[in-house]
Image (tube, rainbow, N blue to C red):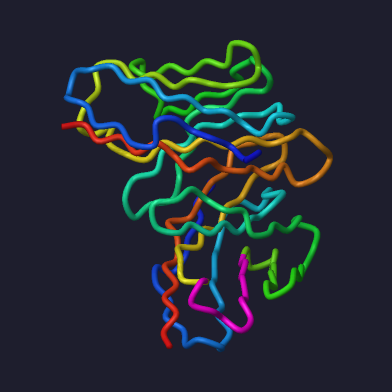
Amino acid sequence: GEDVEQSLFLSVREGDSSVINCTYTDSSSTYLYWYKQEPGAGLQLLTYIFSNMDMKQDQRLTVLLNKKDKHLSLRIADTQTGDSAIYFCAESIANDYKLSFGAGTTVTVRA
Amino acid sequence: DTGVSQDPRHKITKRGQNVTFRCDPISEHNRLYWYRQTLGQGPEFLTYFQNEAQLEKSRLLSDRFSAERPKGSFSTLEIQRTEQGDSAMYLCASSLRTSGGNEQFFGPGTRLTVL
């Protein structure tokens, strides 16, 4: 199957780290993605990881992939108010170009 | 702006009317995708083009929905005889076929409200 699951809400204090978790069921997933959506806007691609990697870091963002447990996480360091948004995890499978998305995690950054 | 653009941004229509949305992808991208997003959910795949060929359609895409990409550039999504259940955000994305991660870049979406 292509089910992708995420926790629905996360509240974090400004300056702390945020960790958003995602689980997926299809073991043949090739790429896993993180998108950010602000109110009324489209989706912004933040980062992605190939399934043969364990970790990818890009400035304040760190992606960890545990392929055995089919678990993906996104860590945002030094969370800012501008990081408040909905974050979507998505997967794609080799030779199948569509993305399957989770329902999104709403991140609220409090002062 | 060289990103994906969509027109219109908002559409309000009465049940039974036909609507058409347009998507202009990033210029060098040969793949174009349509997704639908309802409140509180992630986007769901509708259909996908590689150049002008429509290669896959979701079961979500009923006979009332049709999509075209006639010259392999912009695409249109038409919904005939709209129903209230069609109310959603319709998102377009594009990507470039490479050996990399097939990153899909999304437009701002067209929000459809069917009264």
- Which residue: 45% across, 80% down? A109
Vertical side of B20 occupied by A57: above or below: below
Q: Position of residue B71 (x, y in %)?
A: 64, 12
Q: Position of residue A14 (x, y in %)?
A: 50, 86
On the rendered structure, is B18 left or right of B24?
left
Using the rendered view, name the quadrant where residue B48 is placed: top right
Q: Position of residue A3 (x, y in %)?
A: 50, 51
- Which residue: 75% across, 46% down? B101
Q: Position of residue B61 (x, y in %)?
A: 41, 25
Using the rendered view, name the quadrant where residue B9 is placed: top left
Using the rendered view, name the quadrant where residue B16 is placed: top left
Q: As rendered, which of A44 and A71 lies closer to the eye?
A: A44
On the rendered structure, is B16 left or right of B89?
left
- Which residue: 62% across, 41% down? B1
Report the magenta residues as a range. A71-82
On the rendered structure, is B72 left or right of B6?
right
- Which residue: 67% across, 29% down? B31
The quarter of the image holding the C terminus of chain B is: top left
The extreme front residue here reads B1
Q: Is residue A80 magenta?
A: yes
